[in-house]
Image: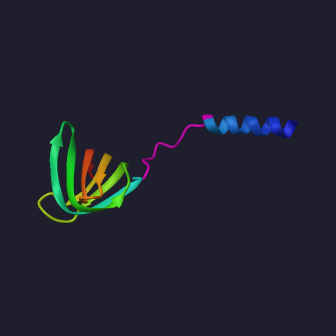
Amino acid sequence: MRKKCFAIALGAALLTAPLPATSAPASGFYSCSGGSVQPSGTAYYVGGYNCGGLGMSDVTVHLRGGPAAGTYTCQTVLYFPTTGNLGGFTCQPA
């Protein structure tokens, strides 16, 4: 019985322990032939075409060509597999 109580107390302590303040890596990635970037408040909207990848939140989007070429980290991405287009919201240059 003591082992069970100890295990419960240890589990509760681990759940209440603070997490380190490091940034987590993006949970998704898309690579696009090109696209556009438009200001949206203090962030940017990223539109990409001919894209492939995976993910919906905390996503890295890489635009390979065009005037907006570069890598962006977006809070949310909507991907349309039938057209290969995506829209990234609340993005920042990576």
User: Which image quadrant for residue 53?
Assistant: bottom left
Q: Nearer the viewer, residue 79 or 94?
A: 79
Residue pushed farthest right? Answer: 1
Out of 38 and 55, give the one closest to the viewer: 55
Q: Main SS of the magenta segment? A: loop
Horizontal and vertical percent position of residue 38: 15, 46
Front-most of residues 52 and 94: 52
Residue at position x 86%, y 36% from top? Answer: 2
Tell me how many marks there are.
Answer: 0
Image quarter in which the C terminus is found: bottom left
Question: Quadrant of the image for the N terminus?
Answer: top right
Q: Is residue 85 left or right of residue 57?
A: left
Residue range in magenta is 16-25
Left or right of residue 33, residue 79 in this image: right
Quadrant of res 52: bottom left
Residue at image point 19% right, 36% down: 41
Relative image position of residue 77 (x, y in whole percent) = 31, 48
Furthest toward the front, the residue is 82
Q: Residue at x 77, y 40 (%)?
A: 7
In the displayed structure, 91 sits above or below 5; it is below
Q: Relative to 15, is 67 on the left or the right?
A: left
